[in-house]
Amino acid sequence: MTQWVVSNNKIKDGFCATMGKPSTIIEDRTNKIEKLRANGVNLYPAGYRVDITTEEILERFGDMDEQALEQETESYSVAGRIVSRRDFGKASFIHIKDRTGRIQAYVRKNKIQPEQFDTFKLMDIGDFVGLKGSLFRTKTGELTLVAEDLTLLSKSMRPLPEKWHGLTDVETRYRQRYVDLIMNDPVRDVFVTRSRIIQAIREFFIEKDFLEVETPMMQPIPGGATARPFKTYHNALGMDLYMRVAPELYLKRLVVGGLERVFEINRNFRNEGLSIKHNPEFTMMEFYMAYATYEDLMVLTEDVFGHVLEQVVGRQVIEYQGKTIDLSPPWKRISLFDSLRETGKVEEKIFDDREPAAALARGLGIPIQERDGHGQILTKLFDHLVEPHLLHPTFVTGYPTEVSPLSRRNDLNPELTDRFELFIGGREIANAFTELNDPVDQKGRFEKQVALRDAGDKEALFMDEDYVTALEYGMPPTAGEGIGIDRVVMLLTDSPSIRDVILFPQMRPKE
């Protein structure tokens, strides 16, 4: 018996290093391609009629014994990639994998056409094949399709790896996600779960009478978040454009226009560094709800998470990176200042004056700029002292006005805003606030942001006169929220890095 299995292969620089030099392996497969073409075999035919998936086969016939299978006379057509092969001279066992799973097939010389068996002998692990046949059980009890007809659907030139080893291979998994998906079923499961999470979120908001909309991804003025944008140029218009850092200001324009409940599952772009929490291109879900407050959105946020957990996860207590997190509502609520007192163990004097706060920040190694205001420093202290410790869902409220340029001021303390950020697993998951709909106040906030930008803050907001004009037409009391989809997927799939939940994350150039 000759057993062909994918074994101990390493992907390096795009090649599979096993059983000899990569060039030797590719030369061997190239020779097979030439033989197949000489035999008149179409290596890349257009389409193949599939009438059943591997999952459907297992669901319909998985519990049948050999006697019951013998009564089944119908043949079925399946297709997939060959992922293992064992040869016994005139017969072979292979496993093929499609989008739903895998199944064993039995290919025997006297069961298919001679030219088909000749083609099969020149096929490799990684090739796509179409099979038609009936079902039986082997002596070991494995449900197996016996091939009565065989078609080569796509010839692969590169051999597949079995597993990944070490940091170099982790990097290659991200660079060559297509190979990662072929070989690692858990990776595929993460992205299936991601799709189901987004679908559940969409269903929830549509059920709540929200309208799904689309807003510009290229904007003449980037706004909606304090972030450094990507800049491009439109030749026909002769003007600079920016990739959006957030859809917020356009979504709120729609509320002004009478679309009282809107949401967008959107791609944003921020010209920032790479980390396990950050990718310059990422997915957010933003929604805006007229006549609501940020307190209403706390309840709504608990509800949407509950819906996703019910539809996708099936439980409210999850494990994330070895820690148990209880997502059962109600979730904890605490002000930013109280969290600094309770978790950060800071002295009360830092709340009264900028200098003690700045001194504490510098002592902790937190970068402080001369232009940073008191509120900015307190927020940086929170990020350092409190955020990493917020394991269970926590709404942190009462953010300083100076770090919340689009948020409504609190009626009792105008130095603070009606805003919350949601933290789970030690990282920010969502940001929400009652929207600032006073055009005079908003213009003043923009002007302060412009001053910060002129002073060197490349993340400060631009002046957006048209948005101020929109507010002058009147925006109803409104609350809005942005939820980081990538971070939600990380949390619910126990993924340590954002690159594990983005199909094609941005990567530094290979050295």
Image (cartoon, rainbow, N blue to C red):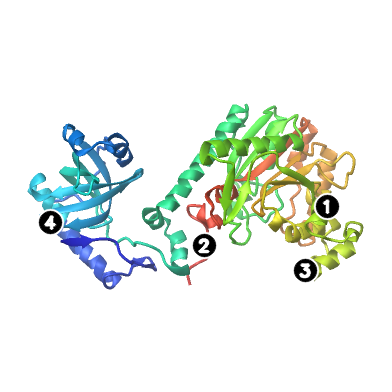
Q: Nearer the viewer, mark 4 or mark 3?
A: 3
Q: Disc 2 on helix, strand or loop?
A: loop
> How much space separates mark 2 and mark 3, taking CA atoms?
31 Å
In this rendering, position of residue 424 left or right of residue 502: right
Please state the horizontal and vertical placement of residue 20, each as a whole percent of the image. Answer: 26, 72
Cα separation, mark 4 vs mark 3, equals: 71 Å
Q: Is mark 4 on a helix, strand or loop?
A: helix
When the figure is inspected, residue 268 is found, relative to residue 214, above or below; the finding is below
Q: Which of 52 and 89 is in front in this view?
A: 89
Look at mark 1 in the image and give the residue it sits on.
337
Q: How crowded is mark 2: few (under 14 residues within 10 Å), some or many (20 or more)?
A: few
Q: Does the image show residue 339?
A: yes
Q: Is residue 92 above or below residue 166?
A: above
Determine the CA span between mark 4 and mark 1: 77 Å
Sequence-wise first label, 4 or 1? 4
Residue beneath the point at 24% across and 70% down: 24
Give the amino acid type for the residue marked by disc 1 in the picture.
Phe
Residue closest to the eye, 301 or 291:
301
Picture coordinates of residue 4 (x, y %)? 23, 61
Q: Residue 38 carries which label?
A: 4
Disc 1 crowd, CA 10 A, few/some/many (<14, 14-19, 20+) = many
First in sequence, mark 4 or 2: give its number.
Answer: 4
Q: In front of the other: label 2 or label 3? A: 3
Disc 2 marks which residue?
507
Which of marks 3 and 1 precedes in the sequence?
1
Give the residue type that dot 3 points to. Answer: Leu
Q: Distance between the residues labelled 1 and 3?
A: 18 Å
Q: How crowded is mark 4: few (under 14 residues within 10 Å), some or many (20 or more)?
A: few
Q: In which quarter of the image is the N terminus?
A: bottom left
